[in-house]
Image (cartoon, rainbow, N blue to C red):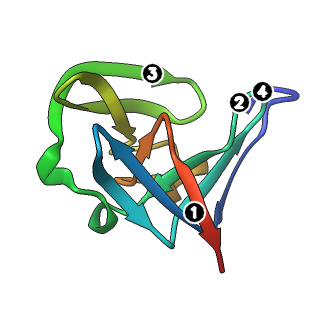
């Protein structure tokens, strides 16, 4: 990490849901919360809690110097709606293979 930049990953207690076009794409009561300096909290959801059958792999890839390379998936009408780090840097290894969506609704907490 660079000076002043911090990333933490912790087990969340929130119950979160992701919908698009009236369909539930994901719902989880075991999200990982990734907090990164200067960015909103992101919820990384286990693959078992995501409707991966509704996602289509995208050609898009991005690189974060702190987390590694992200792969993206789309749904009809929403390109690159979700991403995951399939081989993240060791500092954020917990999010490996978990899916993150731009818009995640918190519907409750434990």
Q: Quadrant of residue 75?
A: top left
Cα gap from disc 1 to disc 3, whole angstroms? 31 Å
Q: Earlier in the sequence, mark 1 or mark 3?
A: 3
Residue 91 located left or right of residue 85: right
Marks 3/2 in contact by CB < 8 Å: the verdict is: no
Q: Which residue is mark 3?
A: 63
Q: Residue at x 39, y 63 (%)?
A: 27
Q: Residue at x 71, y 30 (%)?
A: 39
From where the camera sits, is residue 13 visible?
no
Closer to us: mark 3 or mark 2? 2
Tell me the quadrant of the picture where the C terminus can be found. bottom right
Residue 93 located left or right of residue 47: right
Q: Relative to 71, does residue 87 appear above or below in the rendering?
A: below
Q: Relative to 95, does residue 15 appear above or below in the rendering?
A: below
Q: Quadrant of residue 88?
A: top left
Q: Earlier in the sequence, mark 1 or mark 4?
A: 4
Residue 108 located left or right of residue 7: left
Closer to us: mark 4 or mark 3? 4
Residue 60 located left or right of residue 16: left
- For the residue labelled by badge 3, is the local secondary structure a helix, a strand or a loop? strand
Cα gap from disc 3 to disc 2, whole angstroms? 16 Å
Closer to us: mark 1 or mark 4? 1
Q: Position of residue 76 (x, y in %)?
A: 16, 28
Q: Earlier in the sequence, mark 4 or mark 3?
A: 4
From where the camera sits, is residue 57 visible?
yes
Q: Position of residue 85 (x, y in %)?
A: 39, 41
**Which labelled disc corresponds to residue 107?**
1
Q: Relative to 55, does residue 28 appear above or below in the rendering?
A: below
**Which labelled disc corresponds to residue 39?**
2
């Amino acid at each position: 990490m660079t000076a002043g930049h911090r990333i933490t990953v912790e087990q969340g207690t929130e119950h979160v849901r992701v919908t698009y076009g009236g369909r539930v794409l994901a719902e989880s009561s075991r999200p990982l919360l990734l907090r990164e300096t200067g960015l909103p909290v992101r919820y990384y959801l286990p693959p078992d809690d995501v409707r991966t059958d509704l996602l289509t792999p995208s050609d898009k890839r991005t690189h974060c110097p702190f987390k590694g390379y992200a792969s993206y998936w789309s749904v009809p009408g929403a390109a690159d709606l979700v991403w995951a780090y399939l081989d993240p840097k060791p500092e954020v290894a917990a999010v490996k293979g978990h899916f993150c969506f731009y818009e995640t609704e918190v519907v409750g907490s434990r």
